[in-house]
């Protein structure tokens, strides 16, 4: 029993020496900290949030201006989704929204008339059809924008993960680390390269 115990203790000591000798070859990265503190990651998140807010604004404007022809609605949609509108384009947006609201007001008045004339009935039918088609087009656009946003989120996530991996590999190579572990699976490690990874990541444009 004594011999076996000595053998076991010797094995443990040998393993400890090996670990100590190679301790500098291992490193850890706190991925959560990278995501929470990196300006590079925050910029990606801010871009997605701005895109989401923009899409919400487009849908809200179209919701408030349903009574348009198909051509007018498409033109308004294109303008709302465009970048850096010039003065003429901004005025066109105002014209289209004013037209839609004027028609919506007329539609409300026509619906309240107990005995509309034939001309008024025709206008009522025409504006009602515009409104119905507008709601359907809005639902379709909402789905399309939602899909585009989801795609942007996936693309951004992939870009961030790729960038983090590249930076980790770069830092590890410079520090001659053979393995880098996640901080979530390591209780303690002297070679924590998280701060350096964040610094290098934020140097990216």
Image (spheres, rainbow, N blue to C red):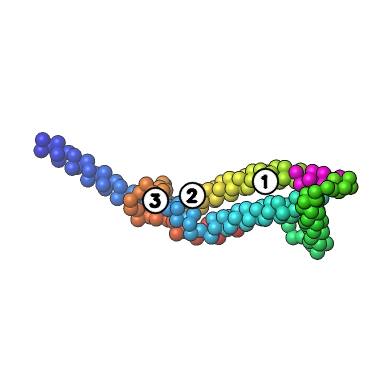
What residue did someone put label 2 on? 169
Label 1 or label 3, whichever comes before in sequence order: 1
Judging from the image, what secondary structure is the residue with disc 1 in? helix
Numbered badge on residue 183: 3
Quick check: can you spot residue 33? yes
The quadrant of the picture occupied by the N terminus is top left
Answer above or below: position of 61 versus 145: below
Name the residue at the left extreme.
2
The crowding category of the residue bearing disc 3, from other C-alpha atoms within 10 Å (few below 14, some 14 to 19, many at least 20), is some
**Number of the front mark, 2 or 1:** 1
Judging from the image, what secondary structure is the residue with disc 3 in? helix
**Separation of marks 1 and 3 at Cα, in angstroms:** 40 Å
Question: Whole-percent x and y of residue 99?
Answer: 81, 56
The crowding category of the residue bearing disc 2, from other C-alpha atoms within 10 Å (few below 14, some 14 to 19, many at least 20), is some
The magenta segment: 122-132
| Left or right: 78 as drawn, with respect to 196 | right
| Left or right: 171 as drawn, with respect to 158 | left
């Amino acid at each position: 029993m004594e011999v076996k115990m000595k053998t076991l203790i010797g094995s443990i000591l040998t393993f400890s020496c090996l670990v100590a000798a190679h301790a500098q070859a291992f490193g850890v990265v706190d991925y959560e900290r990278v995501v929470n503190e990196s300006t590079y990651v925050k910029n990606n998140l801010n871009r997605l949030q701005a895109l989401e807010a923009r899409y919400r604004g487009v849908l809200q404007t179209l919701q408030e201006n349903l009574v348009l022809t198909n051509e007018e609605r498409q033109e308004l949609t294109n303008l709302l989704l465009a970048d850096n509108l010039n003065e003429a384009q901004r005025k066109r947006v105002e014209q289209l929204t004013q037209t839609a609201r004027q028609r919506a007001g007329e539609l409300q008045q026509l619906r309240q008339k107990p005995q509309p004339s034939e001309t008024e009935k025709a206008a009522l039918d025409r504006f009602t059809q515009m409104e119905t088609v507008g709601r359907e087009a809005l639902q379709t656009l909402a789905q399309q924008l939602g899909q585009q946003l989801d795609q942007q989120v996936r693309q951004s996530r992939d870009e961030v993960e790729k960038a983090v991996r590249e930076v980790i590999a770069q830092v590890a190579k410079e520090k001659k680390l053979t393995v880098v572990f996640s901080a979530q699976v390591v209780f303690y490690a002297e070679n924590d390269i998280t701060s350096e990874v964040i610094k290098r990541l934020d140097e990216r444009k």
